[in-house]
Amino acid sequence: MNRRAQSRPHTPVEPSGRRWSGRRAPGPRLRRAGRRGEPEAGNAAVEFIGWTVVLVVPVVYLLVALAQVQAASFAVASAADAASRILEVEPGEAAIAHARTAVGLALSDQGVDTDPATALSVGCADAACTGAVVRVQAGVDLPVLASAGVGRDVVVVDAERAVTLAVSKGGAP
């Protein structure tokens, strides 16, 4: 046998070229730590921020948008109920003005910025006009889309109620 091979016991060599002088061979963690210029070093924070932006931001946007649509839906339903109650109890043209006021209050309570005159529509339910159909309609401003110039026609919520009109003392609704 070669004299050189007998005199030197086998010592593992690290990827950096240094010989390991310890009792055991280096594990994968020590081998990785010995490398210089490793491309993965320090990327955990960047990946965390990246995945947070990719996953969390759209979920938060969706929750905010759904909350605004739900608030507008509740406001429109409340406005239709209030207008129909007024038209049931109060006869005449003053009832429609009071119904518009009630619609404006119900919509503003939920933060829906819509003109009550355009949001409320009242139509006859039958030929004799003893009943009416009250319809309240409002558009919803979605976050970011409103500032991007997209109008309220993206999401429109409405509610409809049918009522029997109040009869005045003269017998006409």
Image: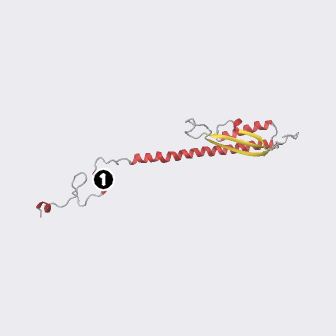
Q: Is residue 53 left or right of residue 7?
A: right
Question: Can you give x and y, in whole percent of width and height, for residue 41 in the image?
Answer: 34, 48
Q: Is residue 140 left or right of residue 7?
A: right
Question: Can you give x and y, in whole percent of width and height, for residue 45 in the image?
Answer: 40, 47
User: Which residue is at 39% across, 48% downward?
Assistant: 44
Rendered image coloring scheme: secondary structure
Count how many numbered circles sit on residues in the image: 1
Q: Nearer the viewer, residue 30 or 39?
A: 39
Identify residue type, mark 1: Arg
In the figure, residue 105 lies in which quadrant?
top right
* SS assignment at label 1: helix
Look at the picture and state if 150 lies above or below 55. above
- Name the residue furthest right: 170
In the figure, residue 148 lies in which quadrant?
top right
Q: Is residue 44 left or right of residue 79?
A: left
Question: Can you give x and y, in whole percent of width and height, for residue 54 in the image?
Answer: 47, 46
The residue to which callout 1 is attached is 32
Image quadrant containing the N terminus:
bottom left
- Name the residue furthest front: 127
Question: Can you give x and y, in whole percent of width and height, for residue 74 in the image?
Answer: 66, 45
User: Which residue is at 30% across, 57% downward?
Assistant: 28
Look at the picture and state if 30 lies above or below 88. below
User: Which residue is at 74% across, 46% downward?
Assistant: 161
Q: Nearer the viewer, residue 73 or 149?
A: 149
Image quadrant containing the C terminus:
top right
Q: Nearer the viewer, residue 51 or 111?
A: 51
Q: Residues within 10 Å of mark 1 (few under 14, many from 20)?
A: some
